[in-house]
Image (cartoon, rainbow, N blue to C red):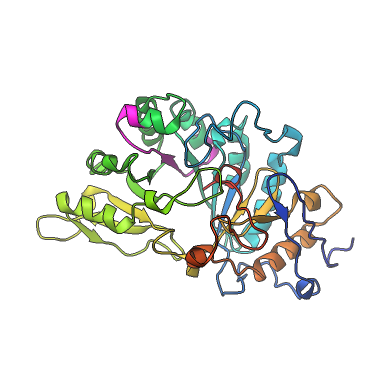
């Protein structure tokens, strides 16, 4: 294949999802030069790439990897099916040329991927077209963070986000469903702060009737800690978690609970396309107290933010998804392991993004319970990360 010939976009159908073909009308479209100016069908730029490095996790949180599905017989991907670190870095370099400024490593639990520090070191060497380093971050359940924080920082990781769904040990052990103690996650947070992996963010998925009584204890604990605490509405990602709207606590209710005890003031978004609405603690005069850290709420269910979503997601085995709630992905691994040049793969990425029009959260109320865009069943969060 010559460098500027039309690349093949190869759909793969498997037990995880159905394939999605590139529309015929775009196969011969002129792709833009890779200079960070790429936009999708709704005018949204490509700025954020989430990369899943493993489909395995040592927790069994009910909203993500419930034991009923992810048991000892679950068919995890064999190692040969995973993208190598070199393949991930090659793709990441092409994404960066098209505008990506932030890369988040995720899973499953990314710290379970052997020698993850090697990948971080490779990615930390990438630069944007303007010559700037990437915002390189990682989301983890914190179980291995205490032992790995220093090595992650030394490899070039900028910061971490830790999932923590409550401070009460009994509640936390119930939610992770493997009897893992909350104290070990808190120790990981301390280690990450000491290593300089900040600003640290802590994500709490709020499930009404399960852990919503932990909202205020979490807010009290992380106030003045330097940690950004974010509350996430329980989302209908995938179909194995038994999602019900009755278990969603709207972010507005979360803010009201905290505000009644610890007054809050709204803050401006830190960057375009940011998923979280930011709030700061108020001082005695009602102004933002910058020493009190801040909180955020991610309201994908009640306040869709599809309009400026600038994120793409790369699965563990090299399938590209254009939405967290997608049901179909593009097979990039076949291109990587074929004879395709960087220019051809770059063209493929451009065409895929240009035809993107996903807005599932905006359409949720008009879709059926198992809908996820063209093709039906939504992909699981453990497969493409949050």
Q: Is residue 227 above or below residue 271?
A: above
Inspect this view and state whether residue 191 appears: no
Inspect this view and state whether residue 270 appears: yes
Is 230 left or right of 314, judged from the image as shown? left
Q: Is residue 144 magenta?
A: no
Towards the viewer: 141 or 89: 141
Q: How many labels were placed on the picture?
A: 0
Q: Is residue 158 magenta?
A: yes
Q: Which residues are magenta?
A: 154-171
Is 262 left or right of 329, judged from the image as shown? left
Q: Position of residue 259 (x, y in %)?
A: 19, 54
In percent of the image, x 47 and y 42: which residue is there?
Answer: 63
In this view, the residue farthest toward the left is 284
| Residue 9, image quadrant | bottom right
Towards the viewer: 221 or 254: 254
Q: Position of residue 149 (x, y in %)?
A: 46, 32
Q: Position of residue 210 (x, y in %)?
A: 35, 39
Q: Is residue 378 above or below residue 189?
A: below
Is 229 left or right of 163, judged from the image as shown? left
Is 46 left or right of 217, judged from the image as shown? right
In percent of the image, x 35 and y 54: which residue is there?
Answer: 297
In percent of the image, x 27 and y 44: which residue is there?
Answer: 215
In percent of the image, x 22 and y 51: which residue is there?
Answer: 257
| Residue 168, image quadrant | top left
Q: Is residue 27 above or below residue 51?
A: below
In this view, the residue farthest toward the right is 1
Looking at the rendered image, the quarter that the N terminus falls into is bottom right
């Amino acid at each position: 294949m010559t460098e500027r010939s039309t690349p093949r976009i190869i759909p793969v159908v498997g037990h995880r999802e159905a394939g999605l073909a590139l529309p015929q009308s775009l196969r011969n479209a002129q792709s833009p030069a890779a200079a960070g100016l790429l936009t999708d069908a709704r005018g949204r730029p490509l700025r954020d790439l989430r990369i899943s490095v493993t489909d395995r996790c040592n927790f069994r949180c009910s909203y993500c990897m419930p034991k009923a599905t992810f048991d000892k017989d679950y068919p995890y991907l064999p190692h040969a099916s995973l993208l190598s670190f070199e393949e991930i870095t090659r793709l990441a370099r092409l994404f960066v040329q098209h505008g990506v400024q932030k890369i988040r490593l995720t899973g499953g639990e990314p710290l379970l991927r052997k020698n993850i520090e090697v990948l971080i070191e490779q990615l930390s060497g990438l630069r944007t077209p303007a010559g700037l380093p990437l915002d390189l971050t990682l989301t983890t359940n914190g179980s291995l963070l205490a032992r790995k924080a220093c090595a992650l920082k030394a490899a070039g990781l900028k910061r971490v986000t830790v999932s923590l769904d409550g401070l009460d040990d009994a509640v936390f052990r119930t939610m992770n469903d493997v009897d893992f103690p909350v104290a070990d996650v808190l120790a990981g947070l301390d280690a990450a702060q000491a290593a300089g992996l900040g600003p640290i963010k802590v994500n709490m998925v709020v499930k009404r009737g399960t852990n919503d009584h932990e909202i205020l204890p979490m807010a009290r604990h992380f106030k003045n800690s330097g940690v950004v605490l974010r509350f996430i509405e329980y989302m209908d990602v995938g179909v194995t978690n038994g999602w019900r709207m009755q278990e969603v606590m709207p972010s507005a209710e979360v803010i009201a609970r905290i505000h009644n005890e610890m007054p809050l003031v709204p803050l401006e978004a830190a960057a375009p396309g940011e998923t979280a609405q930011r709030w700061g603690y108020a001082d005695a005069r009602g102004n933002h107290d910058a020493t009190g850290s801040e909180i955020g709420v991610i309201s994908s269910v009640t306040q869709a933010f599809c309009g400026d979503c600038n994120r793409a997601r790369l699965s563990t085995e090299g399938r590209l998804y254009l939405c967290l709630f997608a049901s179909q992905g593009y097979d990039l691994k076949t291109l990587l392991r074929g004879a395709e040049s960087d220019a051809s793969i770059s063209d493929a990425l451009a065409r895929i993004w240009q035809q993107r029009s996903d807005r599932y959260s905006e359409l949720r109320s008009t879709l059926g319970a198992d809908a996820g865009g063209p093709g039906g069943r939504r992909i699981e969060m453990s497969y493409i990360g949050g």
